[in-house]
Amino acid sequence: MSDVACTPNLSEGNVRQQRPDLKRRLIAVALSTVLPGAGQLYLRRYTKAAFLFIGLIAISVGFWPFRLPRTYPGLLFLLWVLVPLSWFAILNALMARDSPSSAKVSRWWILAGIPLSYMGVNLVFTPLLFASGFHPVKNTSTSMEPTIFAGDKLVVDEHYFHRQPVRRRELVLLRRTLPGSATSSGREETLLLIKRVAGIAGDTVEGKDQQILLNGKQVDDPYVQHKFAAGVNPDLDTFGPVTVPAGKYFVMGDNRDVSLDSRTASFGFVDASAIVGKPLYGYRITGHPLWWPLN
């Protein structure tokens, strides 16, 4: 009788031991979602925590100083290395057991590791991407067609011009407050625009019947698109000559007949401080091509 009476007490003791063990694992899962290896460190599994931290450091080096996201294959490589690292960290924290008597994890918790891993990758990947100077943007304008179409997704390097000067014919992402763009609150709206540099400080730029003259010489622009015949937009087709002041740039869109740019007095020259970065490439999640460089 005494053996039978003791059995319920042992079972209740196991349940009490299993509950805090499961709670600790769920806390570890939350930590590993935010930072791979943090959950293992919390569980005092130092070897696995060190392995995950070393992997995370290696991925961080890929962002900086190697700057692999400057190409789309490099960006995908870092992403797909981070995915299994995050997945392993979360599942390992879920399945960690202090003893054979510890509670087994339900299969539903294991399935929950999929969205948690997706969340964890975003929590790590996005800050690393931004911290290394790369920024995804979506073009909403038609002013750069046919080089860049409305709806195209691009990656911009915000540190590009920290290392080298802005050159003629280079694409730039710039921050601009356009005239007449006031919101309902009365504040003018600041937009991110993509333009091409046509002139740098000291250059003289002139337009004659849709032909651009740079320092008196005609410029051959194979990427330029004209939708209308010369003379339809006289203010855009013929302008200047104007000389670019120090610290300023003369910019234009490739879709010349619809682009609001430095040819008009309302837009004017672009200050060097307004240039945010350089668009590197366009990309798609599906379709062909998956990515293409921008010149």
Image (spheres, rainbow, N blue to C red):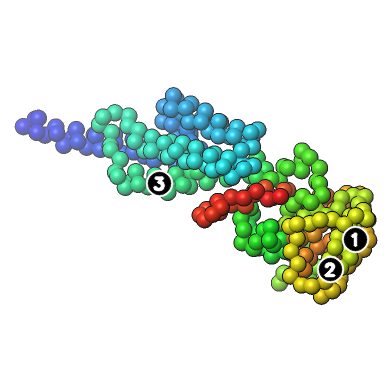
Circle 2 sits in a helix, a strand or a loop, which is it?
Answer: helix
> Which quarter of the picture shows residue 161?
top right
Q: CA distance from mark 1 to mark 2?
A: 11 Å
**Callout 3–callout 2 Cβ contact below 8 Å:** no
Mark 1 or 3, closer to the camera: 1
Residue at 88% in and 63% down: 207
Q: Nearer the viewer, residue 55 or 269?
A: 269
The x and y percentages for residue 268 are: 86, 61
Q: Earlier in the sequence, mark 1 or mark 2?
A: 1
Neighbor class of circle 1 (other Cα within 10 Å; few <14, some 14-19, many 20+) is: many
Image quarter where the N terminus lies is top left
**Residue 44 position within the rendered picture, expressed as x and y whole percent measured from the top left:** 42, 27
Residue 175 lies in quadrant: bottom right
Q: Position of residue 30 (x, y in %)?
A: 44, 41
User: Mark 3 or mark 2, which has the lower sequence index?
Assistant: 3
Residue 256, percent from left and from top? 77, 65
Q: Which residue is mark 2?
A: 236
Tag 3 or tag 1, which sits nearer the N-term?
3
Picture disc at residue 49: none
Q: Residue furthest top?
A: 47
Q: Secondary structure at mark 3?
A: helix
Alpha carbons under labels 3 and 2: distance apart: 54 Å
Q: Is residue 271 above or below residue 207?
A: above
Query: Pointer 2: residues within 10 angstroms few (<14), some, or many (20+)?
Result: many
Question: What residue is at 72 percent from the left and 42 percent from the top?
Answer: 159
Crowdedness of circle 3 by 10 Å Cα count: few (<14), some, many (20+)?
A: some
Q: Nearer the viewer, residue 213 or 261?
A: 213
Q: Which residue is mark 3?
A: 114
Task: Name the kind of residue labelled 2 in the image.
Answer: Leu
Q: What mark, if any, has residue 206 been given in the picture?
A: 1
